[in-house]
Image: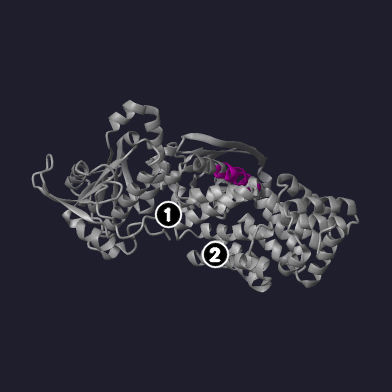
Amino acid sequence: MRPEPFLGSAEGSAAVTHGPTAVTPGPSASGLSRRESTIIAADVVEYSRLTAAAEVSTHIRLRSLRVRIIDPCIVSYRGRVIRNTGDGFLASFDSSVDALACALEIQQEVDATESSEAADLRIRFRIGLNVGQVITEPEDIYGMCVNIAARLEQYAPPGGIVIPEKLVETVRSRFNVPTHDLGHLNLKNISKPVHAYSLRLPGADQSALPVRQGRRRRAKIPSIAVLPFRTSSEREDLYFSQGMVDDIILALASIQGLLVISRTSVLSYAGEPDLEKVGQDLGVSYVLSGSIRRAGNALRVSSELTDLESNSIIWADRYDGDLSELFDLQDRIASRIVWSIAPQVREAELKRALRKRPGSMNAYDLVMQAIDLIYRMNFEEFSRARGLLQQAIALDDNYAVAYAYAAMWLMHNINQGWTSDHAADAQEAERLAAVACARDSTNGFALGIHAHARAILFRDYETSMTLFDRALAAAPGNAIVWTLSSGVYAYVGDGKESVARAERGLRLSPVDAQSHFYLLFLALAHYVNGTYEESIIWGYKSMALNPRLCSNMRWLIASLVGLGKFSEARHIAETLLKLQPRFRLSTYEKWCPLKSDLRATLLDRLRIAGIPD
């Protein structure tokens, strides 16, 4: 469910006077149909002056606002972009509540995004709304209702919204926004005056009355559409293409932090050459497209990922296979595509977040930056991550992922030996993980973090396994959930299951920057399984990728001792103590997640390597 906008809610729109209405039955004599709609007309303030001052920068920023804010916002509030006008847009909604919520959110997000620009170069929109009967065609709309919306827009202040009298009660009752009565306006080419009101928004009029609700900016996660791959008319090719696209969509949908458009929503875009139109219609920032060609039993699949904001291909690849292995090939290619493009999307999103100034960042941007700092395991950078997560929560209290990573931060803080109060950090981590699940009970990642907290902080193995089952039912392709779930099976001594889960997580892992974390759990799994040689291999691989990950060193030391490699174990122990000088076995015994017999063996091996009691 979509979070509420900062000024109100779009839920229950059918219950209001100007909610969705049915299309007038049948076409008119001219073949045109009429329906009641709410229209948004928007225009960039002083666009000619902006382009004269900085043509390229203005064009790039306006395109970015359309792809990242305007189009997704219109689509998510069940609207439709009728046309882009170069320096503005026209959109239609069945519900006036949806249209108002959308207009308010667009102005808020544009204001925040452009706040880092010089005041005289900021892109700002004027917006006018109107509700009434419109004449509809497949690609356009007409009528007096549309004309009035366009004329009202001209009376809006920069960053502001003007509405007709008939929408005022909806605004006051649903959004608590102060209004200013503009009186009866004589609009150009409109015979009767229109009684209109200007909404007093903080970004539009600094002398305006404050809104009653605090400003919140919801998390804006990246979105992607997977278009049907282009094929010949051969039935086998079509069958293969549809199955593979289904697999790609299903796998992408399991990746935390990525919004994937459903298969039914993209079917009508088969062979669509205009990717910008796809992005506008579906409100996405990335499009995956491709083609399938067959020669005899040989298949060639080409695919490419387009970033609509920069209008550039950021990844492309080609795959070859044999039609006789159809299902295996379909599975393999889908997995390779997902594994390849997910890091590209994450990297592109992180770069965008890092380029933004603090005032223009939303909750998603802040979480992206925090994740990057967390997994470096450098104390100074790691410490900064917590502040970013707290800011994300303050901006969007409904963002479950921000709470989940805040809980994860505390668990890492404990494992790295940086906590000054283990018990307090453990309780807070549990609280944050539980809040994450309360905010979104179907979020597999949040459930997985809560399950991990129950196991690693409280040795509550049964609850942890139950939560992991729920997490994987919700997100069967989530790599980190599979990996974390391997931990609880290791803690209770089920090495075989732990190895299987850790290996599956590593296969699914699309985020290279965190691969040391996946390898740590594989090393732990092999240690408990008694396959020490394997544990040492993965432990060293993890250490090479991140030499500051202390928990990994503990399993590596124990595996080396298990094989009688005492000198090597002592060397790793010295490295561990340099990073974690306060580490003592007597303290670790209290919070080591292993069950009692495994814990005793681990402590003995760490002691042999020179870790003090």
Residue tagged 2: 432
- How many numbered marks are there? 2
Relative placement, left or right, of 403 versus 517 is left
Instruction: Please report the bounds of the magenta region as a residue range.
Output: 330-346
Task: Please tell me which of labels 2 and 1 falls first in the chain.
Answer: 1
In percent of width and height, residue 271 lies at 47, 40
Mark 2 lies on a secondary structure that is helix
Residue 218, disc: 1
What's the distance in space between the residues labelled 2 and 1, CA to CA? 18 Å
In percent of width and height, residue 546 lies at 70, 47
Task: Tell which of 413 and 142 is nearer to you.
Answer: 413
In percent of width and height, residue 228 lies at 50, 45
Q: Is residue 98 above or below residue 285?
A: below
Relative placement, left or right, of 197 versus 572 is left
Which part of the image, by quadrant, shows the C terminus?
A: bottom right
Is residue 414 covered in magenta?
A: no
* Figure quadrant of residue 187: top left
Identify residue type, mark 2: Leu
Task: Tell which of 490 and 136 is nearer to you.
Answer: 490
Looking at the magenta stretch, what is its main secondary structure? helix
